[in-house]
Image (cartoon, coloured by chain):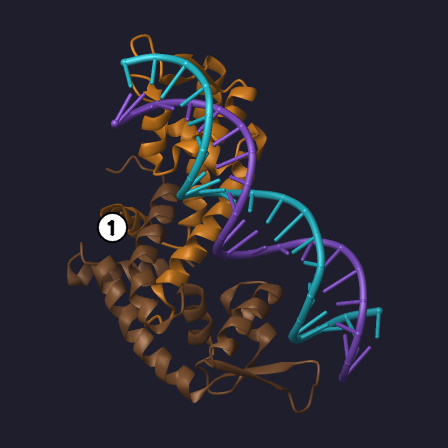
Chain colours: A brown, B orange, C cyan, D purple
Amino acid sequence: MSRRRLGYLLKHANLRLTELTGPALEPYEIDGREFGVMSVLRTPEPLSQLEAAQRLGIDRTTMVALLDGLERKKLVGRRPHPADRRKNMVELTDHGREVLEAATRAVGVAEEEFLAGLPEEDRRLFRDLLDRLV
Amino acid sequence: MSRRRLGYLLKHANLRLTELTGPALEPYEIDGREFGVMSVLRTPEPLSQLEAAQRLGIDRTTMVALLDGLERKKLVGRRPHPADRRKNMVELTDHGREVLEAATRAVGVAEEEFLAGLPEEDRRLFRDLLDRLV
DNA sequence: TATTGTTATACTCTATAACTATA
DNA sequence: TATAGTTATAGAGTATAACAATA
């Protein structure tokens, strides 16, 4: 039985996954955080900056800088909310949607690589258990 | 089936666990990283600073600051290696051992709380799967 | 008054480079 | 020459406080 702490295991699992997804995303010139933002923007209706931040569990001030970068790369666009001009609606550009689609496949491969040490059934099980914990 | 990314799940699992272990360790005036260092020092033979750092997967320069803090609190002690004076052997003090013992119990409780959403069998399973991935 | 986005700022965690002392 | 510990420094990543615009 493992004597390693849960905190150690989670931290290093995270590190190892980052080592795999980082290079996987490199061709698309985005990092894991930017990928996370783009993923959350793939919704039926556009989200405000604040809504996007809340779904990711990050601060709205952090979201500003992330969107600045993604907008500079023409992957997302901001436009004022028609009814509430305090808000920005954030949407993927057509180019952003293409990049996200390809990046999603690449991240999927990286995740499979991360889980490669487990047999197929345990991979699904691990994902499911983790999902229930968060 | 979960649509959330593995990266998101691992990051937030980590955050949630930290939110539980942090307060659990507060009475002992150490944080999670210091607890990790102390845990790794509970070995039959004393470790050098570098050996301790390597077991935790952190840089030796990071270890210096961590040990400075722990030494200030009289939880660990450094003494020169008798045969190789470049090295410091690091050992828990008697007080450090007592604190570690109590802190370990507190962290154990926090980990159980973290896993509380899963039935007993799945808790062991999750731990085991995670251990095999890291 | 409260909310959204923004900016400036500061804090935490970590690593890299350069130094000292030993080997 | 190489290694262990140390220091100074810099880079991520993040949050807090304060402001402008709007509700």
Q: Amino acid at mark 1?
A: Leu
Residue D5 percent coordinates (x, y): 42, 22
Viewport quadrant of the C terminus of chain A: bottom left
Instruction: Say whether residue B70 is visible.
Output: yes
Neighbor class of circle 1 (other Cα within 10 Å; few <14, some 14-19, many 20+) is some
Instruction: Say whether residue B106 is visible.
Output: no
Instruction: Say left or right for B53 vs D8.
Output: left
Residue A74 vs residue A82, the one in the foreground: A74
* Residue under the image location 25 percent in, 50 percent down: B133
Q: Image height check: is B113 above or below B33?
A: below
* Residue under the image location 57 percent in, 74 percent down: A51
* Residue under the image location 50 percent in, 45 percent down: B20
Residue B96 percent coordinates (x, y): 47, 19
Residue B131 percent coordinates (x, y): 26, 45
Residue B130 vs residue B114, the one in the foreground: B130
Q: Subunit of mark 1?
A: B
Q: Image height check: is B34 above or below A86?
A: above
Residue B40 percent coordinates (x, y): 36, 28
Q: Image height check: is B29 above or below B9?
A: above
Q: Image height check: is B38 above or below A127?
A: above
Spot the residue most to the bottom: A82
Residue A5 in which image quadrant: top left
Instruction: Provide the residue designation for mark 1.
Output: B133
* Residue under the image location 33 percent in, 80 percent down: A101
Instruction: Say left or right for B97 vs A80.
Output: left
Instruction: Label 1, secondary structure: give it.
Output: helix
Viewport quadrant of the N terminus of chain A: top left
Marker count (numbered): 1
Instruction: Say left or right for A90 vs A110.
Output: right
